[in-house]
Amino acid sequence: LRMLKQVARVTAQSKASGCSQLVLPLRFLGSSSRQVPADASFHSTSFSEAEPPRVLITGGLGQLGVGLASLLRKRFGKDNVILSDIRKPPAHVFHSGPFIYANILDNKSLREIVVNHRISWLFHYSAVLSAVGEANVPLARDVNITGLHNILDVAAEHNVRLFVPSTIGAFGPSSPRNPAPDLCIQRPRTIYGVSKVHAELMGEYYYYRYGLDFRCLRYPGIISADSQPGGGTTDYAVQIFHAAAKNGTFECNLKASTRLPMMYISDCLRATLEVMEAPAERLSMRTYNISAMSFTPEELAQALRKHVPDFQITYCVDPLRQAIAESWPMNLDDSSARKDWGWKHDFDLPELVATMFNFHGASTRIAQAN
Ligand SMILES: NC(=O)C1=CN([C@@H]2O[C@H](COP(=O)(O)OP(=O)(O)OC[C@H]3O[C@@H](n4cnc5c(N)ncnc54)[C@H](O)[C@@H]3O)[C@@H](O)[C@H]2O)C=CC1
Ligand SMILES: CC(=O)[C@H](N)C(=O)O
């Protein structure tokens, strides 16, 4: 209705001005050799209150995807959220809701999935993270850049609202580090960072060019209790909890003083759902920083000692990860997200540590009992 009213208003205005042509903002115009309809944005509101979105999550078996599926299924219903990956799901994931094989490098099958399952929202989580990306640049380029192109095209062609996560890794050594604002110089030195800046810019371009409803958050390093990280620079902040609960010691691959922005997974996933549900008129940008806390390995170890008093940390620095971490911001400025769509984190460092220990303490006790 809103869109019809808008068209009627624009038509009335153009009649009143004596102009017979329907004048639309540049965002509404488009023609291309790709199969993107020029009037894509006339249909871009794909979710009415009567009908929940039909959701596809790509790369869903990584650190974040299963948790996202669980959150979205609570909100939209189990059968409306399809998890996908190129790996075989563990039994508990397979039995928790719809799961399909989806390779983002296979254009044709992506289209089939979106059409056959009437997908209206897509969360694009497939990626090769920072450390693994430096070890295999061609793979990172294929998955993070070619794969993204396939996703952008299929989303624009079928009027799918698209979420693509970016990262603190989209900043580089010449970006302001404390804090990094939403808009600043971005010259990352990793293929991961370059691919994420590319994703931010391509998504914004498709928004203006084709009316694609592209939404993007720059995540800090994400800390989760029940899923393992996939080969990034911030992985130590997850592994340290497993090690502390298991044997009370941890060898850290970053220097004691390396400060990075971090976030507990439930804040990250809630932010993701909130920005996807935010009314379009609340979003002044397509890509927002989000932030919660920032700490060094030494500060984290100190916080852990409140729960494991004799916890020991040693350092065996990995030069590759250290160089990456030193090129990333120490803090993100997320004031725009807070102002525009009301973003607010729940977990600071003490709550994070207590929550992680509750989980690990419980699983250690279960393992001991078994
Ligand atoms: N975990 C974190 O700390 C952060 C994650 N992000 C972003 O969030 C997203 C999800 O991150 P994680 O779950 O941690 O990543 P992850 O590395 O744990 O999982 C990525 C998934 O992508 C899948 N994948 C790889 N190639 C594929 C292909 N050709 N087709 C389909 N799937 C493919 C992998 O099998 C894997 O399950 C990524 O885009 C990542 O860049 C951003 C900042 C921080
Ligand atoms: C911050 C990220 O994007 C990721 N965890 C990584 O370290 O590569």
Image (cartoon, helix red, strand yellow):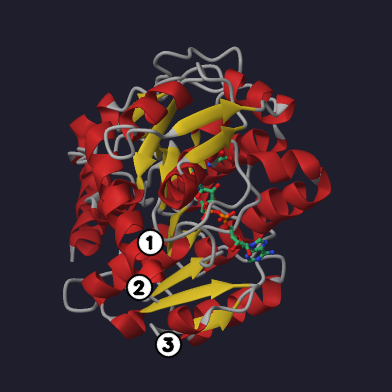
User: Badge 2: how crowded within 10 Å, few (<14), some, or many (20+)?
Assistant: few
Whether label 3 touches label 1, CB < 8 Å: no
Q: Which residue is mark 2?
A: 369
Q: Nearer the viewer, residue 299 or 70?
A: 299
Mark nearer the N terminus (3 vs 1): 3
The three-letter code of the residue at mark 2 reads: Ala
Foreground mark, 3 or 2, reads: 2
User: Badge 1: how crowded within 10 Å, few (<14), some, or many (20+)?
Assistant: some
Q: Quadrant of the N terminus?
A: bottom left
Foreground mark, 1 or 2, reads: 2
Q: At which x and y percent is residue 281?
A: 23, 44
Q: Quadrant of residue 325?
A: top right
Tell whether 47 sits left or right of 194. Answer: left
The three-letter code of the residue at mark 3 reads: His
Whether label 3 touches label 2, CB < 8 Å: no
Report if residue 307 is visible in the image: yes
Q: Secondary structure at mark 1?
A: helix
Q: At which x and y percent is residue 129?
A: 63, 45
The three-letter code of the residue at mark 1 reads: Thr
Tell whether 292 sits left or right of 311. Answer: left
Q: Which residue is mark 3?
A: 95
Report if residue 234 is visible in the image: no
Mark nearer the N terminus (3 vs 2): 3
Q: Which residue is mark 1?
A: 364
**Residue at x-position 34% and y-position 35%:** 304
Q: At which x and y percent is residue 331?
A: 40, 21
How far is the residue under mark 3 from the one under mark 2? 26 Å
**Residue at x-position 43% and y-position 36%:** 220
